[in-house]
Image: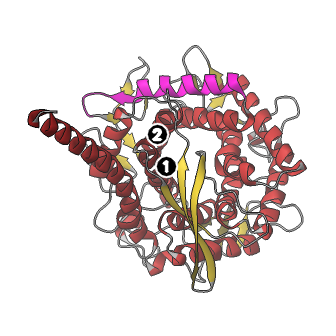
Amino acid sequence: MTLRHTLIAALLALATMAGAQAEEDAGQRWRQHAQEDLLPWWTQAAAQGEPLGRFPTFRCNDGSVYLAAAPCHELAQAPDWIKSELKRDYVRMQSRQIYTYAMGFHLTGDIKLLKLAQAGVADLRARALDKRTGSAASWFENGKPQPAIGMRNAQDLSYAGLGMAAVYYLTRDPLVLSDLIKLKQHIFTHQDPKTGLIRWQAKDGGNGDAQREELVATLDQLNAYLILVTPILPEGPLKRRWQEDIGKLSGAMVKRFHDADRGRFWGTRGLPDSDSADGRHNDFGHTVKAYWMLYLAARQNQDVELARLARDGMRKTLDAAWLQDSSSWGERWRQDGSAVPHKSWWIYAELDQAAATLAVQEGDDPSRWQAAGQWWLKHFVAAPGGEVWGSVSADGNARPQLRQHHWKNGFHSMEHALVNYLASQALADQPATLYYATPATRVAARFKPYTFEGHTLSVEKLQVEGTTIQKVSIKLDRYKR
């Protein structure tokens, strides 16, 4: 080989190494995003609740807890849809914050985050769950659980299970699983025997809500606990039943809410605006989340046809949402089919997660997903102070707004960081490092890398503040042509 060829080969090798290092660093950037951009907001003393684990629903932008006697300006002047809720502490938001701490620990190994998640679960289980029925309160007002059992909507009930699901995923705590099973059984008393869908409410109360057809009533059972917990359940009748329920809910959703011709899911049925671009939940977020959950459900149940429908649907939605001029995602369809360029944090996160899943598990081109992630890091991060903004304009500006309220907590932003970290590591052909806290048993725990699949390379057992945790290196399964 000539000196010239040797130099060329060396330069190519260095370029390859540099490219691999850049891809590996991309994964670390998402871990850093969780540690430096998101968690500072949730590790403030005010976020941790009084007593510890009773996390507040509303906080001011300086991090302090909302006080009715002396409200901060941003909550005193909040829009009516927020101001009307300020007397309530929502269980769904406590549960989402539990998830935030749990997955923060999953990414970082910080034992304080695991203990905050466990404190939140302990408070939720003791205070919000009805021991007789398994139901969960939707909110507390003046210390009392509300509304009455039977009047609690299925979406709130599903998200009461989110935090328990996240903690069980990490710890395999049988007591947490027991309460999650009871909650799930209660929710499934809402199931319509004719359609297989979960009804919005069990009782009507004179307002017609028992007959409301809402996509999220069914979809969020998959999203909040079924998809995450079912694969790690002990083999046996319970796991088989949950797998069957996943299949039935998936089929019911497709039959009633899916528009195959347009490649989207409708958020409601039977309302005057159900088929309108401006209708409730007719956005890219609910559609892509439905396809993503169906894809994960199909993979678990080895349903080839459902996987194809969901894969094609995700691709079609991502194509519709992509804004080439800004290398970012839009929010929803206009009536003419074009994309509204405004961005909502949770919709953007769901689109990113679908794109990441396709890149890892189907071999799709990751370039749009990678560019969209850079846009997120540049424009969504709410610095200084932490978390991300909920709403960003097409040009990347975030108008003054709240970092946290009764629909915005850490769930979507932390899930986004976790999925992007895992996908980045997989695409760089590098193992992911995740932390768990499973008890020592004769049968080794199956360490599943969230919604992906993979095989464990190594497990390092650590003793931290009296708790056994596992630092696990996992190589994610990746599609190879």
Element assignment for label 1: helix
The residue singled out by tag 1 in the image is 419
Left or right of residue 20: residue 435:
right
Residue 318 lies in magenta, yes or no?
yes
Residues at discs 1 and 2 in contact (Cβ within 8 Å):
yes
Q: Which residue corresponds to the image point at 52% horizontal and 28% vertical from the top-left? A: 314
Report the front residue among 92 and 66: 92
What secondary structure prevails in the magenta region?
A: helix
Q: In x, y percent, where is residue 39? A: 42, 68
Placement of the N terminus among the 4 image quadrants? top left
The amino acid at mark 1 is Val
**Location of mark 2 (residue):** 356
The image shows residue 267, relative to residue 387, as above or below, that is: above
Say which element carries label 2: helix
Q: Which residues are magenta?
A: 303-326
Residue drawn at (64%, 74%), measured in percent from left and top? 118
Residue at the top extreme?
A: 261
The CA distance from mark 1 to mark 2 is 7 Å
Q: Specify whether 357 is left or right of 1.
A: right
Asked whether residue 124 is in view, the answer is yes
Q: Quadrant of residue 330?
A: top left
